[in-house]
Amino acid sequence: MQHGDIWRGIDLLAKHHGLSTSGLAKLAGLDATAFNKSKRLPKDGRPRWPSTESISRILTAVGADFESFALLVSGRDLVAVPSILQSDLENMSSPPGTNGAGAQAVQTFTPPCLVDIERCIAVEICNDELAPIYTIGDRLIASCGADLDEGDRVIIKAKGRRALIGALCMISDDQLEIDTYPNRQVFDRTALEWTARILWISQ
């Protein structure tokens, strides 16, 4: 974490709440010039760091937590994707979130890698059938239609069957073998209605 990273986080926090850095400082009860760029690197060349107290006060002022601030400091940002319950996957013949299918809410997360956000969904685990791999309340961020490789954690939906969550053990031109904890199942690729690669688990 560098000096400039912290100040970037403050700048982005202000921007996200429709404020200037001066406005953010005043909202937090600080001097309006507290975050001026001229004060970040004074004439003596010694970098000035914001205090933990001032960071705490601005987060409280806008109702943000430190985790979200840390994301801004890291240069990443939150995105929103359609969110559904695990039980909603049962009979979806098309990927959830496609044309609004099954999407009832939104989940925000920070992408762990460069992904096509337009194809991402969040699935909330609502029973313990996959424990201890996934537990109630976990949200699986998955990319629908993403390329699959052996070892990937996936969601698959075959014709006439409920959607399954598991790990991809084997992939060929014709078939997929999925470990669905604790069983393994083989599916013809022509029988699959849709697949999604799990990218991240948000707890």
Image (cartoon, rainbow, N blue to C red):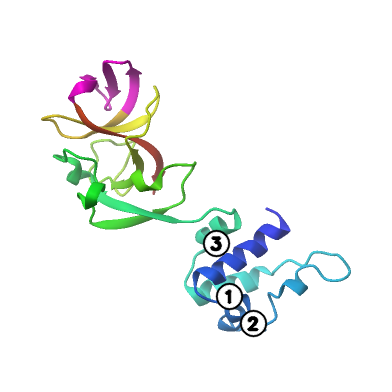
- Left or right: 26 as drawn, with respect to 123: right
Pointers 2 and 1 in contact (CB under 8 A)?
yes
At which x and y percent is residue 131?
A: 29, 36
Pointers 3 and 2 in contact (CB under 8 A)?
no
What residue lies at 58% left-to-right and 71% top-to-bottom? Answer: 56
Return the residue found at the far left.
160
What residue lies at 84% left-to-right and 64% top-to-bottom? Answer: 46
**Which of pointers 3 and 2 lies earlier in the amino acid sequence?**
2
Q: Main secondary structure of the magenta part?
A: strand
- Left or right: 92 as drawn, with respect to 171: left
Secondary structure beneath disc 3? helix
> What residue type is disc 2 on?
Leu
Determine which of the numbered discs, if any, sits on residue 30 in the image. Answer: 2
Disc 2 crowd rating (10 Å Cα; few below 14, some 14-19, many 20+) is some
Magenta-tinted stretch: 167-191
Secondary structure beneath disc 2? loop
Is residue 174 magenta-colored? yes
- Left or right: 57 as drawn, with respect to 125: right
Secondary structure beneath disc 1? helix
At which x and y percent is residue 113?
A: 49, 41
What residue lies at 28% left-to-right and 20% top-to-bottom? Answer: 176
Distance of label 3 from label 2 (alpha carbons): 18 Å
**Which of pointers 2 and 1 lies earlier in the amino acid sequence?**
2
Return the residue found at the far front.
99
Quarter occupied by residue 155: top left
Reading the image, the residue beneath label 3 is 69
Distance of label 2 from label 1 (alpha carbons): 8 Å
Determine which of the numbered discs, if any, sits on residue 57 in the image. Answer: 1
